[in-house]
Image (cartoon, rainbow, N blue to C red):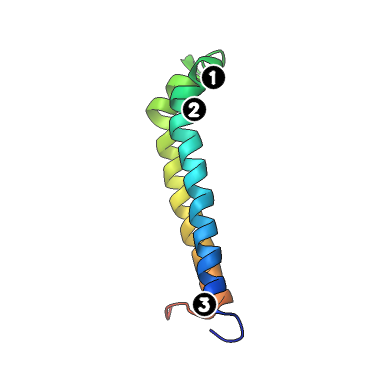
Amino acid sequence: MEDKSGAEYWRRNVKLVLTLLVIWFVVSYGCGILFVDALNTISIAGFQLGFWFAQQGSIYVFVALIFVYVRQMNKLDREFNVQEDE
């Protein structure tokens, strides 16, 4: 790491992880349990949205979060010059 400190790298890494965990929590617990009644008033292709989030939507969001994490960490690694050789 050149002029930026390792503490800054880890601070931003932890911030990214916490942000993604909050999204994960809202989607899995919020959309699948807490907001299910409100979401079930919306129907897409014959399925209630709350049911869809509980059964499939959360999984799609989780996979998307993995790709977002990888992309953002690669960007952060390049910014702090700690990337692995490609």
Closer to viewer: mark 2 or mark 3: 3
Label 1 sits on residue: 39
Quick one: SS at disc 2? Answer: helix
Indicate which disc, 3 or 1, sits on the residue closer to the N terminus.
3
Dots 2, 1 in contact, CB < 8 A = yes
Quick one: SS at disc 3? Answer: helix
Alpha-carbon span between mark 3 and mark 1: 43 Å
Indicate which disc, 2 or 1, sits on the residue closer to the N terminus.
2
Quick one: SS at disc 1? Answer: helix
Q: Residue at x 41, y 26 (%)?
A: 54
Tell me the kind of residue under disc 2.
Answer: Cys
Q: Residue at x 48, y 21 (%)?
A: 50
Tell me which corner region of the image, top left, top right, bottom left or bottom right, holds residue 79: bottom right
| Residue 77 versus residue 22 in the image, above or below | below
Residue 34: image x %, image y %? 48, 23
The circle drawn on residue 4 is none
Asked if residue 46 lies left or right of residue 56, the reply is: right
Label 3 sits on residue: 6
Closer to viewer: mark 3 or mark 1: 3
Q: Is residue 57 visible?
A: no
Q: Residue at x 46, y 38 (%)?
A: 25
Label 2 sits on residue: 31
| Residue 62 versus residue 73 in the image, above or below | above
Q: Residue furthest front?
A: 7
Indicate which disc, 2 or 3, sits on the residue closer to the N terminus.
3
Tell me the kind of residue under disc 1.
Answer: Leu
Relative to the observer, which residue lies in front, 28 or 63?
Answer: 28
- The 10 Å Cα crowd at callout 1, few under 14, some 14 to 19, many 20 or more, is some
- The 10 Å Cα crowd at callout 3, few under 14, some 14 to 19, many 20 or more, is few
Q: Is residue 66 visible?
A: yes
| Residue 57 versus residue 70 in the image, above or below | above
Q: Residue at x 49, y 19 (%)?
A: 36
